[in-house]
Image (cartoon, coloured by chain):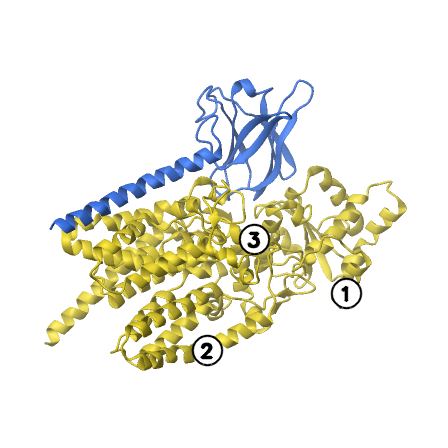
């Protein structure tokens, strides 16, 4: 049930805002492995140069893994996020970040999903709700149509 | 004559079987992939299910003793407010041979079907809605956002609730002049069962009784007779209601440290009433997406036009609208963390003791789903009378889309490994286990609460007493208090440390034995690598080499046994330890 699991780590940030390469360190059962996030299309499902950086990290059977997202600097690397996260027992997990530039450098916000480069979770959630409202409008129009039809008969 | 009666019975049975099949199919989709009955995993999203599994496993102690000695050792866990009596009675009846996970799966798969059948029955018999339009009421009540929330958060006892619709049906019949005398008894029994399902459902049942009886008294010419009718369910319910209140108020439960925050995080918002979205399960302890369903909302919105010449729907629509308003809690907010919003009626109770018991105002939507669903079904029935059967049929398909796609239930469930680390097998039976998992839960945030509850789930499988508590989300338990002191000693220790720190580690085994602890389980995945090494070194020095190391059950667990014989009175030593090393930052509800 747990064989072959992966964590897909994605970070949305425009190339020009990135001071150095992005990396993710995954620690499971005391062992740490580091992966580079890329935006060159070499990872399955990644669209080259769209500002969505991706790494697919294989994991074992643990319920929890520690994930650190960082950016390499000229002198030292900067840690943007470092936390223990629960992962599902089967299937692939995903971990998405929206990176923002501030006076202190890059700041990572963990988000549920990333619809496109340069868009944050709020936009993504609003897009989902807009889709639901579209469905609602369709239902409302159909019911309204039936009501009007019924009054004519 | 007999032939036609037999045929009618056959037709009724066939119609009922078709409805059961239809709702069962929706239930399979709604709770997918629960129906696969894969014993290696179970499906949930948050961590409340661990507490429910714990309650099922320890149901006898919960019901008859009020204290479970196997968790929060050595104090024992306070279980004086079990709330979910229906689930507890099912677990008691099932006995030890049925696994707690099997009971949970039964509630997840069959519970919504039972609720939907009852709501459909109520719409058809109580409000004269023809089939198949009455199915809309069942879909709205059985397969809604709150049902998805109950499943994904883990409080599955809410899922088996046919009582509210059955109570409504009995109340409708009672307010008619030709009601049989037994109807009052039935209403009283359904009222009791609603309260036994959950305190919240009991409150909604009481509101339903009040609303329907006031409406009945106003509508009837013979008011004295109406009041006499109302007295029967009240007389049936009252003894149980008093007993429940006595048990509830006599016991103690957890209190949220910030009632305002608790009541807003457990409240509806415009976004939550619309649909689920990918972030809804992410950042808090909750998985609350409670869409009203656009078929229900649209048919309800047109009800004043479609049902203008009919009676008996205005009270339901008014109840549904009021329930939606109350579900917002103190503020009608847009949701999505956008802030803002306007004060809602519940703002009058914000911060008052009332909110101690109602800090999930979103649950008032159970009333909205029931009453709104019946109004929607009546509207659909009336529309179909006018436009014909076929044009109305897409409404049923749309309602199923609302139940599955808007709640997003099958897309949000996550598999959780059912197996536990095998290292626990090395602990002799009856010996208490101290689980160490890094920092204090308060510092770890949600992960801390999740792991605390996970170890109590492990307890239901391995059977040894553990120091973690299964129920409280707030405050500290025995594990937190003892682990903090043990971890401090271990982190201070290293070869060449001060004599005091060395002595602390050398004395650790004696301390653990005095506290009645027979084993220490280190959950090494949950420690920062820098902390893990001194902790394992310290434990090796104090307790010798590990008795077992396991990497199955989703974790690496290093288990050490305490070689000294445990103390017969660990409670006194525990209290002495707390007095000797006082701790700051305790909050109400700490045990």
Q: Which mark is residue A58?
A: none
Tell me whether circle 3 and circle 1 mark residues in contact (CB < 8 Å). Answer: no
Q: How many angstroms separate mark 3 from mark 1 (CA)?
A: 44 Å
Quadrant placement of the C terminus of chain B = bottom right
Q: Which residue is mark 3?
A: B260
The answer to whether one can see residue B565 in this image is no
Helix, strand or loop at disc 1? loop
Q: Which mark is residue B567?
A: 1
Side of B546 relative to A46 (left or right): right
Counting from the top left corner in percent of width and height, residue A141 is at 24, 43
Q: Residue at x 36, y 58 (%)?
A: B320
Mark count: 3
User: Which chain is home to disc 3?
Assistant: B
Q: Are marks 3 and 1 on the same chain?
A: yes
Q: What colour do you see for chain A?
A: blue
Instruction: Count residues near mark 3 (Cα–Cα under 10 Å), then give few for <14, some for 14-19, many for 20+.
Output: many
Counting from the top left corner in percent of width and height, residue B576 is at 80, 63
Quadrant placement of the N terminus of chain B = bottom left
Q: Which residue is mark 2?
A: B238
Viewer-proximal residue, B150 or B348? B348
């Amino acid at each position: 049930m747990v064989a072959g699991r992966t964590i897909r780590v994605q970070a949305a940030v425009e190339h020009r805002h990135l001071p150095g390469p992005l990396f993710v360190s995954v620690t499971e059962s005391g062992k740490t492995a580091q992966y580079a996030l890329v935006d060159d299309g070499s990872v399955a499902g990644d669209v080259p140069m769209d500002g969505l950086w991706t790494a697919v990290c294989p994991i074992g059977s643990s319920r929890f893994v520690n994930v650190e997202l960082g950016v390499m600097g000229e002198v030292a690397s900067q840690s943007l996020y470092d936390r223990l996260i629960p992962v599902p027992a089967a299937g692939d997990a995903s971990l998405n970040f929206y990176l923002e530039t501030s006076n202190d450098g890059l700041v990572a916000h963990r988000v549920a999903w990333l619809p496109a480069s340069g868009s944050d979770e709020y936009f993504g959630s609003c897009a989902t709700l807009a889709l639901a409202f579209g469905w609602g409008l369709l239902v409302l129009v159909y019911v309204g149509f039936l009501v009007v039809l019924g009054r004519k008969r | 004559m007999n032939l036609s009666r037999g045929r009618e019975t056959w037709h009724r049975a066939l119609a009922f079987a078709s409805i059961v099949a239809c709702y069962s199919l929706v239930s399979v989709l709604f709770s997918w992939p629960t129906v696969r009955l894969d014993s290696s995993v179970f499906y949930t999203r948050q961590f409340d299910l661990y507490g429910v599994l714990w309650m099922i496993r320890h149901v006898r102690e919960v019901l008859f003793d009020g204290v479970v000695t196997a968790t929060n050792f050595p104090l024992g866990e306070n279980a004086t407010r079990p709330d979910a009596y229906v689930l507890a009675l099912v677990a008691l009846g099932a006995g030890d041979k049925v696994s707690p996970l099997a009971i949970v799966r039964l509630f997840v798969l069959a519970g919504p079907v039972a609720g939907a059948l009852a709501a459909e029955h109520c719409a058809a018999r109580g409000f004269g809605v023809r089939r198949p339009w009455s199915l809309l009421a069942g879909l709205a009540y059985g397969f809604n956002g709150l049902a998805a929330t109950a499943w994904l958060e883990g409080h599955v006892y809410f899922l088996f609730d046919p009582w509210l619709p059955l109570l409504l049906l009995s109340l409708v019949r009672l307010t008619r002049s030709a009601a049989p005398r037994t109807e009052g008894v039935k209403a009283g029994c359904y009222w009791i069962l609603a309260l036994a399902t959950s305190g919240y459902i009991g409150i909604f049942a009481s509101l339903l009784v009040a609303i329907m009886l006031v409406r009945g008294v106003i509508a009837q010419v013979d008011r004295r007779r109406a009041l006499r009718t109302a007295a029967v369910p009240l007389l049936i319910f009252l003894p149980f209601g008093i007993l429940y209140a006595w048990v509830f108020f006599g016991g103690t439960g957890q209190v949220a440290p910030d009632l305002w925050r608790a009541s807003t995080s457990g409240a509806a918002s415009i976004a939550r009433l619309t649909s689920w979205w990918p972030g809804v399960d992410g950042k808090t302890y909750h998985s609350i997406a409670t869409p009203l369903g656009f078929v229900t909302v649209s048919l309800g919105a047109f009800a004043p036009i479609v049902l203008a010449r009919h009676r008996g729907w205005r009270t339901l629509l008014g109840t549904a609208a009021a329930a939606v308003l109350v579900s917002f809690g103190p503020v009608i907010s847009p949701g999505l963390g956008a802030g803002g919003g306007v004060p809602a009626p519940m703002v009058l109770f914000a911060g008052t003791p009332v909110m101690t018991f109602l800090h999930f105002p979103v649950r008032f939507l159970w009333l909205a789903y029931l009453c709104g669903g019946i109004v929607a079904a009546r509207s659909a029935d009336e529309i179909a009378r006018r436009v014909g059967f076929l044009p109305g049929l897409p409404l049923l398909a749309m309602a199923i889309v609302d139940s599955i796609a808007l709640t997003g239930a099958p897309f949000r469930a996550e598999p959780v490994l059912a197996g536990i680390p095998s290292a626990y097998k090395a602990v002799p039976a009856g010996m208490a286990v101290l689980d160490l998992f890094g920092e204090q839960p308060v510092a770890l945030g949600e992960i801390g609460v999740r792991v605390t509850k996970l170890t109590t789930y492990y307890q239901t499988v391995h059977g040894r007493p553990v120091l973690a508590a299964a129920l409280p989300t707030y405050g500290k338990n025995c594990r937190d208090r003892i682990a903090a002191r043990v971890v401090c000693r271990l982190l201070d220790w290293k070869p060449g440390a001060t004599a005091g720190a060395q002595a602390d580690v050398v004395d650790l085994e004696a301390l653990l034995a005095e506290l009645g602890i027979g084993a220490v389980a280190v959950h090494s995945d949950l420690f920062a690598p820098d902390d893990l090494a001194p902790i394992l070194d310290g434990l090796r020095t104090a307790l010798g080499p590990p008795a077992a190391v396991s990497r199955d059950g989703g974790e690496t667990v290093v288990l050490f046994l305490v070689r000294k014989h445990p103390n017969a009175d660990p409670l006194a030593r525990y209290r002495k330890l707390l007095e000797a090393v006082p701790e700051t930052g305790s909050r109400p509800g700490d045990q």
